[in-house]
């Protein structure tokens, strides 16, 4: 049955052999799609709910698979408009992506073995990164995110379903996106998650109280906290 199982095929842009120009164009295209789908909104709503609004006045946040740092910039700007200070550290394996992020808080590394001490950040987030991993890698990723988070973890990824696949197919077909990006976008949905799958992996990672839910039918959210919000 279509989309019954997660695809395991690697995406074109997962390869470290992609050139600097290809990576730049990738993030330009991804930015266009993400803005249409309101990619930052789940975190703007979810982080205050997760850690409590009182703690939102000053947060240190680790973004896993941050790429060009666009999520951190969007969330820092929206937090500033509310009088909050959100300081992001961007982690990604692709140095060429991090070069686009600018700033000084950029770390090249893997989400499977984070180069940080326990409880190093108030919160750990990831947006559309987890689907790039195998199931066993996802368990390590969740466990590591939990280890370095002081207050909580919020992961946001694609929900594997036919409606999202069709909507993305129409969007990418109707605009001028590179062929590789179109193929990767559809493959990302095929590699996405169902709620029970991510719940089971969170349990394997040792997070029995993790909450996994759908966000407007297009995303799957995993959120878990170490203490009750203020």
Image (cartoon, helix red, strand yellow):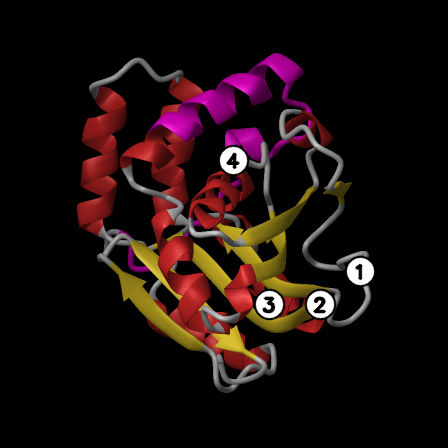
Residue 148: numbered disc: 2
How far apart marks 1 and 2 lie (CA) works out to 7 Å
Label 4 Cα crowd, 10 Å radius (few <14 / some 14-19 / many 20+)? some
Label 3 Cα crowd, 10 Å radius (few <14 / some 14-19 / many 20+)? many
Up-down: is 207 above or below 172? below
Magenta stretch contains residue 13: yes
Asked if the residue at tag 3 contacts the one at tag 1, i.e. Cβ–Cβ closer than 8 Å, the answer is no
Q: Residue furthest front?
A: 83
User: Where does label 1 land, which residue?
Assistant: 116
Question: In the image, which residues are magenta?
Answer: 3-32
Residue 142: numbered disc: 3
Q: Earlier in the sequence, mark 3 or mark 2?
A: 3
Q: Earlier in the sequence, mark 1 or mark 3?
A: 1
Return the x and y of residue 121 as percentages of the image width and height: 69, 63
Task: Name the side, left or right, on which 161 lies relative to 125.
Answer: left
User: Where does label 4 land, which residue?
Assistant: 70
How far apart marks 3 and 2 lie (CA) works out to 10 Å
Camera-near label (1 vs 3) is: 1
């Amino acid at each position: 049955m279509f989309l019954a199982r997660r695809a395991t095929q690697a995406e074109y842009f997962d390869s470290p052999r992609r050139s600097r120009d290809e990576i730049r164009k990738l993030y330009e295209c991804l930015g266009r799609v993400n803005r249409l789908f309101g990619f930052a909104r789940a975190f703007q709503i979810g982080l205050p709910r997760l850690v409590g609004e009182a703690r939102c006045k000053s947060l240190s946040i680790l973004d896993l698979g941050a790429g060009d740092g666009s999520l951190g910039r969007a969330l820092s700007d929206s937090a500033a408009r509310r009088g909050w200070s959100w300081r992001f550290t961007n982690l990604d394996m692709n140095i060429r992506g991090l070069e686009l992020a600018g700033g000084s808080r950029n770390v090249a590394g893997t989400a499977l073995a984070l180069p940080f001490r326990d409880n190093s950040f108030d919160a750990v987030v990831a947006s559309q990164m987890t689907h790039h991993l195998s199931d066993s890698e996802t368990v390590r990723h969740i466990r590591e995110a939990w280890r370095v988070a002081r207050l909580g973890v919020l992961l946001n990824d694609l929900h594997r379903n036919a409606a999202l696949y069709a909507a993305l197919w129409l969007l990418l077909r109707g605009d001028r996106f590179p062929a590789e990006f179109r193929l990767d976008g559809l493959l990302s949905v095929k590699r996405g998650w169902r709620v029970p799958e991510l719940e089971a992996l969170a349990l394997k990672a040792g997070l029995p109280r993790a909450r996994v839910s759908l966000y407007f039918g297009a995303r799957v959210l995993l959120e878990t906290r170490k203490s009750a919000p203020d």
